[in-house]
Amino acid sequence: MKVLIAIDAFKGSITSQEGSRAISLGIREVCKDAEIVTVPLADGGEGTVEALVQATNGQYYEKEVTGPLGNPVKAVYGILGDRKTAVIEVASACGLPLVPADQRDPLRTTSYGVGELIADAMDKGCRSFVIGLGGSSTNDAGIGMLQALGFRFLDEKGEEVGWGGQALRHIRRIDSTRAHRTLQECRFHAACDVHNPLYGPNGAAYVFAPQKGAAPEIVRELDEGLRNFAEIVRRERSLDIDAIPGAGAAGGLGAAFAGFLGARLESGIQLILDLIGMEQKMQDVDFVITGEGKLDDQTSMGKAPMGVVRLAQKHRIPVIALAGTVVHKASLNETGITSYFSILNKPMTLAEAMDGRVAFDNLRSCTNQLFRLIQAIRCRKTR
C-alpha cells in the first residue's frame, strides 16, 4: 500500500510536518509495510518557506534586516535544492506580528527588509524567486522593498520621500538608475490568492489597512497615497499597476513586484504544487491524505488541500481529508474529497483541541482507526 500525505498546517496548533508525522505513525501502527510519502503543504502564506525547503532538500538562511518599524529583526528565508531559487515570505521581514499592537501604524511601517532579503539571496547566487505575499504590516506599495534594492522615490524638491505609507503621496519622480543591476537577470513568482486592486474601495488601504492599525481617516490618507503612486508610475513607466489583479496584496507589494520586478502574480497553491512536483509524487499512490485545521466552504475556494484534491481526482485516487472542524459537509464531497473526518474524539474546548500535543495524538488516533478499517477490507478481498 502506498499513501501520500499532503496536509496544510493546522494553524495555531500543529505544523504540516508535525501533522504528517502523526498521520504516518497512525498508518504504521496498522500497516507496517506501507510506503508513505509525505509532502509538506502550504498555499503561499505562512509555512511556504518551510514546505518548499523540506520538499526540495533546500537550506534555511537567517539574515538581520530592517524591520517594519525600522528596528533590526532576524528574518529567515530559504534556498531550494537547486541552489538557484530563493523562497521568501514577506511576513518574515515586515509581518504584522513584528509590530506590537499599540504601535501598529501603516503610515510608518516599511517593507524595506523584504528588499534586503532579496539582495542577500542574489548575493548567494539566486536568480529565481518565489515570494509569499501575505501577512504584512505595511501599506507602502512596496516602495520600502524597492528602496532597499536601489530605487529612489523623490518629492517635488528632488529629495527622497522616506519610508512608510505616509511617503506615497509625496512622490513626484522615480529614479531607477541605481537599482541593483542583478535584478535584470532575475525572475520573480509571487504567490497571491487575492485579486484586490491597488487603491479604491476594494484596494489595499480600505480592505487591509484597518487590521494593520489604520483608523478611518488614516485609511483615506493611505488610499490617496496609493493613487498618487499609481499615477506617477503610469506617467514615468507607462504601467497601469493599479489594474493588475492582486496589486493590492500585502499592502501593495503585489503592485511593486509586478510593476517593477516583472513578477507573475500566481495562485499560491498551484505555484507550490508545481515547484514540489506534487503530480509526479502521486504515481502509483493508493490513498491521498490531506487536510487543515478547518474544512469548510473556503476550502473549495483554492486553499491548499483543494489543489491536492484536484490532482488526486485527475489520477482517480481516493482522498481522505482530516481536520479539527468540518462544516458545510455535503459540499466537501462534491469538491472531490472521497471522505472527510474530524479528528476530535470527545467534547473539548477550542483551546484544548488546538493544543499541539492533543492535535498530534488525535491525528494519529484517527488515522489508526481509519487504516484498521482499510486494512480489514483489503484483507477480506484477498481471501
Image (cartoon, grey):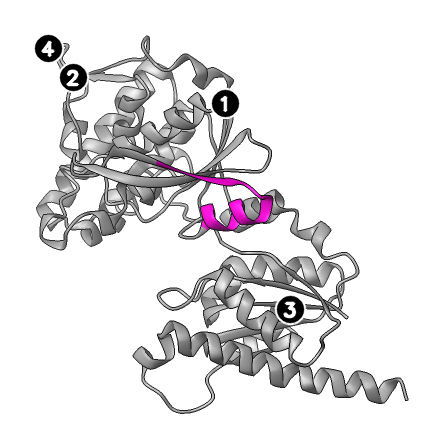
Q: Residues within 10 Å of mark 3 (few under 14, many from 20)?
A: many
Which contiguous range is marked in magenta? 48-62
Q: Nearer the viewer, residue 297 or 294?
A: 294
**Residue type, numbered disc 3:** Gly
**Residue type, numbered disc 4:** Lys
Inspect the magenta stretch and tell me whether residue 314 lies in it.
no
- Report the Cα–Cα distance between label 1 and label 4: 38 Å
Q: Are marks 1 and 4 in contact (CB under 8 Å)?
A: no
Examine the rendered structure and indicate whether residue 150 appears above or below residue 377. Answer: above
Q: Residues within 10 Å of mark 2 (few under 14, many from 20)?
A: some
* Residue linked to disc 1: 125
Q: Residues within 10 Å of mark 1 (few under 14, many from 20)?
A: some
Q: Position of residue 168 (x, y in %)?
A: 19, 28
Q: Nearer the viewer, residue 301 or 323?
A: 323
- Report the Cα–Cα distance between label 4 and label 3: 60 Å
Sooner in the amino-acid sequence: mark 2 or mark 3: 2
Q: Secondary structure at mark 2?
A: loop
Q: Secondary structure at mark 4?
A: loop
Q: Secondary structure at mark 1?
A: loop
* Residue linked to disc 4: 157
Name the mark on residue 160. 2
Relative to residue 115, is residue 97 drawn left or right? left
Name the mark on residue 349. none
Examine the rendered structure and indicate whether residue 101 appears above or below residue 179. Answer: below
**Residue type, numbered disc 1:** Gly
Name the mark on residue 336. 3
Q: Which one is closest to the eye, mark 1 or mark 4?
A: 1
Q: Are marks 2 and 3 in contact (CB under 8 Å)?
A: no
